[in-house]
Amino acid sequence: MARVTPRKPVTDANPRDRLLEAAIRLLAAGGPEALQARRLAAEVGTSTMAVYTHFGGMGQLITEIMREGFIRFGRRMEKVPRGDDPVADLLALGLAYRDHALENPQLYRLMFGVTSPGGRQGGKDLALSAVANALPEGQAAFAQLVAVVTRVIEAGPCEEEPASAAAQIWSAIHGYVLLEIAGFFGDDDGVERFLLPLGTKLAVGIGAAPEHAARCARLIGAGRGVP
C-alpha cells in the first residue's frame, strides 16, 4: 500500500497553508475559473507575489490543491469502518466515495482533470489527469479500494487480479458520481435506484454471492434511510 506522509495541520501562522485553504474555498464557491492570483491574494489579504513566493506560480498551486483534495478524500475513506464482511465494506466504501464527491463537487472534478482553471469543461484535461495519476496521495486512496477488493476476491471463487478489479470498480463509481454531480438523476436519490444496484453487480463480478451482495446493499440502504 502506498504511504503518504501526513501534511502538517493548517495554521493561521502558515501563509502557504492559508493560501491553499483560501484557494479551495474559492474553488468551491466559484469553480476553477475563480482560481486567479489576484482573487486569491484579495481573499487572504496579501499581494499576488505571495502566490509565487510560496508555490512558484498558479500551476504548482493547482497541483497542491489536487494533492490536498486526495488527502481529504483518503481520510474520508479511512473513516469508513471495516468489519468482518468485505462485501459490506466495499459497498460502504462506495457510498462514502459518493458522499465525499457530492459534498466537494468542484474539488472532486479538479482532482480528476474533469475541469481546469482555464475554464475548459465537458472534456478531460490530460495535463491535470497526468498530475493526479502521479500523486502519491491519489495512489494511497486507490490502495484503500484495492485492499477491500482483495478481501472480497479472497473470500470467493474469483481469481481476478485485485488492482485490475479495483480499477474497474473505481471507474464505474467515478462515472456514476460525475453523472449525479451533473444532475442526470434529477431530484431523486440515485443511491437507491442506481448506485447500490451498481455496487451489488460489481461485488458479484468479483466473486460475491448475489444473494449476499443484495442483502448487504439492502442493509446499507436501510442504514442511510433508503426505503
Image (tube, helix red, strand yellow):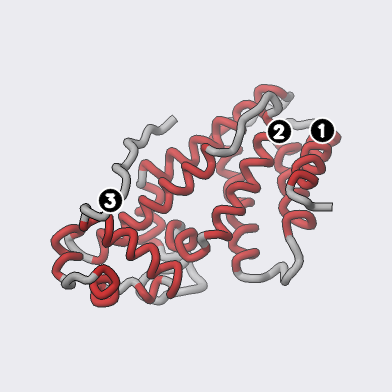
The answer to whether the residue labelled 2 contacts the one labelled 1, judged by CB atoms less than 8 Å apart, is yes
Per the rendering, the mark at residue 87 is 2
Residue 180, image x, y percentages: 65, 64
Q: Is residue 193 left or right of residue 173?
A: right
Mark 1 and 3 residues: CB-CB less than 8 Å, in contact? no
User: At label 2, which amino acid type do we have?
Assistant: Val
Crowding around mark 2 (Cα neighbors within 10 Å: few <14, some 14 to 19, many 20+) is: many
Residue found 27% across the figure and 62% down from its top: 19
On the image, which quarter does residue 163 sit in? top right
Say which mark, if any, is on residue 75.
Answer: none
Q: Is residue 9 above or below residue 211?
A: below
Identified at 45% across, 72% down, the residue is: 29
Which residue is tagged 1?
212
Q: Of the residues shown, which amino acid type is indicated by label 3? A: Thr
Q: Amino acid at mark 1?
A: His
Which circle, 1 or 3, is nearer the viewer?
3
Mark 2 and mark 1 lie on one chain; the one further toward the N terminus is: 2
What secondary structure is found at the residue carrying circle 2? helix
Please indicate whether residue 188 sits to the left or right of residue 133 in the image: right
Q: Which mark is residue 11?
A: 3
